[in-house]
Image: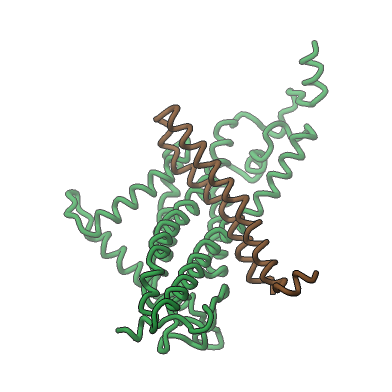
Chain colours: A green, B brown
Amino acid sequence: MFSLLTHVALGSPAIHVAPAPDFMLGGLQITNSMFYGWIVCVLLIIFLTYIARKVTLHPKGGATQYVEAGVDFATNLVEGAFDDKKVGRKYVPYFVTLFFFILLNNWSGLFPLVGESWQTESLHIGFHPLLRPMTGDLNATLAMGLVTMIVVYLASIREVGGFRKYIRHFFIGSPLNPLYLVIGLIEMMTDLTRVLSLSLRLFLNVTIGEIVIAVFAFLGGALAPGGVLSPIVALPFTLLELGVGALQAYIFVILGVNYLAISVNAAKAHDHDDLTEDDVPETIEAKASGAAS
Amino acid sequence: MVFADAAGSLSIAHGIMIGGGFIGPTIGIGLVGANYLQAVGRNPEAAKFLGQALVFVGLIEVYGLLAFASTFFVK
């Protein structure tokens, strides 16, 4: 038992931002975060399928009610962002899946024997841990961000009713006005940074949580021989990471939903506008002269 | 220059990066929290916007974390 607790590399904490390869599989390097991601995915499918079969009209308690509360919370989150709840309901399955996927991946990274702080004699390759949370890998979060933004773009084009109307929502007024044109173009540029900001936020929060836990486990290991105190010293930061993991899942989902909802709501609110509308002379000169007269 | 050589310029660089990078997000999160509490104090119904306040906290803190992460690339 106590051999497991000596999980801190003596000397200085070995910290890695990048995942490390565990083994080769058909010429493909399987990294520790991929490996743990697969394990968590399989467990997640089994667990949530088991829970879904146990849902009854009169809740009996247990793990089912917590999952139900989570699903209800995420469903309200997604539906509440849209003006029209019927539109929102179509995208509930994707975003609720994303919520549980990120939440349980973040939390499963805090288990014992997982992550940067657990580098035992038996459970590491080189100085890298064997298992590492999947969301602590930029490749995984970049994939999630890319898929989410592709879903958001395709769904908003479908809901708005055409590519042209989708582009139209970037412009707050007529694109013929030079000011609105520039603002619209800047809006379109910032839209492209969303993939990076979504994925970097999740990755950095999880990875830096790992590093903070590893550093404090190391400091605790320096207090007593054998690293007996390090889990106790690292415990407050592990508890903090529970909150951070939940908050990051919430933020990822609510930002993805809002990116979709902004374009859909704007298009529904200004359904009568069109690019070909030329009877409104919206130029700065017209406004200025109108205000003066 | 002499001071940097004596104390280790890398340590000083890391200290400046972490300190300078964290001060902005810290002030920002403080402003978000202060304004949220002020809004709740004036109008208790505003308490339902805690989720949105937390979203802004998440938006802000990523910049501090970027500064922290870049210390690993400054060698």
Residue A29 picture quarter: bottom right
Q: Quadrant of residue A167?
A: top right
Q: Position of residue A23 (x, y in %)?
A: 50, 87
Does A252 sit left or right of A238 as displayed? right
Along the line of sight, which residue is nearer the eye, B45 or A53?
A: B45
Q: Is residue A120 above or below residue A84?
A: below
Report the residue at 70% width, 49% height from top.
A189
Q: Nearer the viewer, residue A115 or A36?
A: A115
Percent across and percent down for residue A146 are: 58, 60
Based on the displayed image, in which of its 4 quarters is residue A268 positioned? top right
- In the foreground, A87 or A177: A177
Q: Quadrant of the N terminus of chain A?
A: bottom left
- Give x and y (percent) for residue B30: 53, 44
Total count of labels: 0
Please, is residue A97 above or below residue A288 in the view?
below
| Residue A260 appearing in the image | no
Residue at the spot x=55%, y=84% of the render? A28
Q: In which quadrant will I find the C terminus of chain A? A: top right
Query: Where is residue A190 shown, x and y percent of the image?
Result: 67, 49
Q: Is residue A290 left or right of residue B34?
A: right
Residue B16 to residue B55: above or below: below
Residue drawn where x is 49% and y is 72% of the image: A215
Q: Is residue A35 above or below residue A25?
A: above
Decide which of A210, A198 is in the foreground and name it. Answer: A210
| Residue positioned 58% across, 41% down in the render | A263
Q: Is residue A289 at least partly visible in the picture?
A: yes
Q: Is residue A289 left or right of residue B6?
A: right
